[in-house]
Image: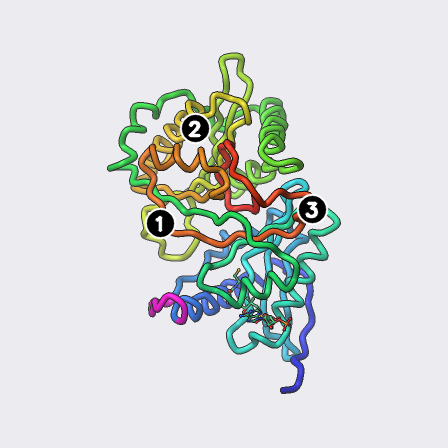
Amino acid sequence: MAPMEFTIRQMTPGDLREVAEIEASVFTDWYRIHRRDPEPLPRRTIAELRYATSLDPRGNYVAVAAEGALAGFVLSRTWGRVGWFGTFGVPTQFQNLGVGSALLARAVEYLSPRTDVIGLETMPESGANIGLYTKRGFTVTFPTLILELSLIREGDHLRTRADGGCLAWGVQEPGARKRILKSVRDISGSLHPGLDYSREVVAIDEHGFGKTLLATDRAGALEGFAIVRTAPFREDDTSGRAYIHVLGVRGGAHDESVLLRLLGGVWSATTKLGFSKVVTGLSARHARALRLLLGSGFRCVRAAIRMVDGVGSYDVSGTDQLVHLSRWAG
Ligand SMILES: CC(C)(COP(=O)(O)OP(=O)(O)OC[C@H]1O[C@@H](n2cnc3c(N)ncnc32)[C@H](O)[C@@H]1OP(=O)(O)O)[C@@H](O)C(=O)NCCC(=O)NCCS
């Protein structure tokens, strides 16, 4: 077969509609083949793609075929010195022609000089993806576990903690916001060297996609935060699910009580908006946090494979005691 001609360029806002189409069609095909799910996947909303790509506007790329149609895309971002890539997709008719590898190489070229470790997540059924990433230098580490809590059944006990004193970032004065962002940076760095989630706090607020809840000690110092997403990911979302995008508790804080206080805040913020479930994801490395969540009524619904590049600076063995919920590489 003749090699396919394409070029790679940075993604622009004008690409988002086509990216949404490609993403839905690629993953519809994938679910049909690997999970025998015949239902077409709804498109990601344009607002959602705008939010996701705003996190690191220079880290998103598209492949353009000779006749001008998009032949693939990749999103990537940095959280301080931690890099991440995904979502990543090439239309089924263009797969296995080198497009995905070229997109991946471009994302890695963007992330490598800026970060010490790059992470990704992929589906356990996809031997091809795990093989592709392994060939490109990534190593499989602890899986991500995806957990779900019914707010009206197993999570009802959080009702008693709903007024437990979480503050919201969005209503803080500019001076306080600056101090809080610095504390979010410090807490992120206590969870993994160089990690910084402060950009996520700002973005979710600016895009009206959810809110950040803050747990402070008696002296007003930040002990933990939860970034909760309430805007839909895909069109026609009737799942009733809100999402804890990131939750971090300062290493060494009274983490169990801070976690429960934050979960009480999540319960309150999401039930007020009519949600009946909340979903989150975390690395199985954080064994204690996992047990605390399961003890709070969360159920494990599935797992994803996590892979990292940069293992020189990243210990892939051993569980830890950190309370760190996030679908990044750690
Ligand atoms: C994953 C995806 C983006 C890759 O794009 P692509 O254009 O098909 O990839 P390429 O043609 O550049 O490269 C495929 C590579 O995987 C390798 N590969 C495929 N199956 C493999 C396997 N089972 N084991 C090892 N390597 C495998 C190929 O040999 C090739 O590597 P090479 O160039 O070194 O020979 C594309 O297949 C896709 O969109 N899949 C569906 C959605 C998806 O899974 N997205 C990623 C989620 S993490």
C-alpha separation, residue under disc 2 versus residue under disc 1: 21 Å
- Secondary structure under the numbered disc 1 in the rendered image: strand
Query: Residue tagged by mark 2?
Result: 259
Q: Is residue 193 visible?
A: yes
User: Which residue is nearer to you in this view: 21 or 152?
Assistant: 152
C-alpha separation, residue under disc 1 versus residue under disc 3: 32 Å
On the image, the x and y values in percent for residue 78 come to 64, 46
Query: Residue tagged by mark 1?
Result: 301
Classed neighbour count for the residue bearing mark 2: other residues with Cα under 10 Å, few (<14), some (14–19), many (≥20): many
Extreme residue toward the bottom, this view = 1
Vertical position of residue 220 compared to residue 39: above or below = above
Q: State which quarter of the image contains the N terminus.
A: bottom right
Q: Earlier in the sequence, mark 2 or mark 1?
A: 2
Residue at the spot 43% in from the left edge and 28% down from the top edge: 259
Residue at the spot 60% in from the left edge and 26% down from the top edge: 183
Q: Which residues are magenta?
A: 33-40
Vertical position of residue 62 compared to residue 140: above or below = below
Extreme residue toward the right, this view = 113
**Amino acid carrying mark 2 in the image:** Leu
Residues marked 2 and 3 touching at CB (< 8 Å): no
C-alpha separation, residue under disc 2 versus residue under disc 3: 31 Å
Q: State which quarter of the image contains the C terminus.
A: top right
**Amino acid carrying mark 1 in the image:** Val
Residues marked 2 and 1 touching at CB (< 8 Å): no
- Secondary structure under the numbered disc 3 in the rendered image: helix
On the image, the x and y values in percent for residue 54 come to 60, 49
On the image, the x and y values in percent for residue 283 come to 49, 43
